[in-house]
Amino acid sequence: MKISDLTINADAFAKEEIKQHNSEIETLYNIAMNKGIELAKHYNANIDVVKIGLSLMDCKLPKAQVDGTPEKHVEMSVDATKELLKKYSIDNDIKATIINCVEAHHGTKEYISIEAEIVANADCYKFIHPKGVFTFASMLGRRFNNRTKELEQLKYKLEEKYQTLSLDKAKEELEEYYKQFKEMLDIAKV
């Protein structure tokens, strides 16, 4: 199978996981995917690899949330990615890059490619861009029904993703939103 087949199947796999376990995160999935494609074009990166990385980076997050182990979603997603990649005869360097896209999307592991860095930066839009912040806030409201917990989680993800930002284009687009949401969350906490 070709990489274009993997791109289609990775997207279908991720969307099936979302549908089965937590359909409300599809908006966040689409935010990251759209921004990732835009960043890939801007940085002349392999768009298929970026799409696959974005599809698979959180593919097991819905299941991990249902299981009460969201902190294990990266490990679970890496395992699922490795399993899926076994079905494709694509270059080993491409496979390693895709795995790195998944394992490094929180910015805690070194990027081995521009594609992995793009995936991590595209993920930041889910928690810093207004469309993502408001979507995430709405989800948290239904999940916690506790204003203090909701604000803490919003601030945690805002800070985590701001620390992950590394690409000039993403920083340029998100910097002002970060400052505004940080200020608003500090005021709301009082």
Image (tube, helix red, strand yellow):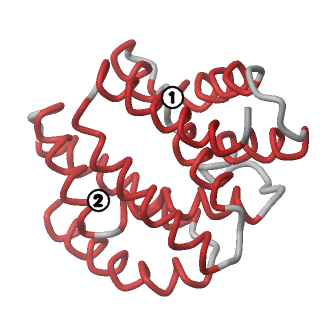
- At a point 56% along the width and 73% down the height, the residue shown is 39
Query: Residue 86 has which mark?
Result: none
Residue 21 on image: x %, y %: 31, 20
| Disc 1 crowd, CA 10 A, few/some/many (<14, 14-19, 20+) | few
Q: Secondary structure at mark 1?
A: helix
Residue 85 on image: x %, y %: 73, 27
- At a point 59% along the width and 43% down the height, the residue shown is 7
Rendering quarter of residue 130: bottom left
Rendering quarter of residue 98: top right
Query: Residue 71 has which mark?
Result: 1
Where, quadrant-wise, is the N terminus in this rendering? Answer: top right
Residue type beneath disc 1: Glu
Residue type beneath disc 2: Gly
Q: Is residue 97 above or below residue 73?
A: below
Cα distance between the residues tagged 2 and 1: 20 Å
Q: Between disc 2 and disc 1, whose residue precedes?
A: 1
Residue 119 in the figure: left or right of residue 59 = right
Residue 32 on image: x %, y %: 43, 57
- At a point 16% along the width and 32% down the height, the residue shown is 144
Q: Is the C-beta separation of discs 2 and 1 under 8 Å?
A: no
Judging by the rendered image, the residue that carries numbered circle 2 is 132
Residue 174 in the figure: left or right of residue 110 = left
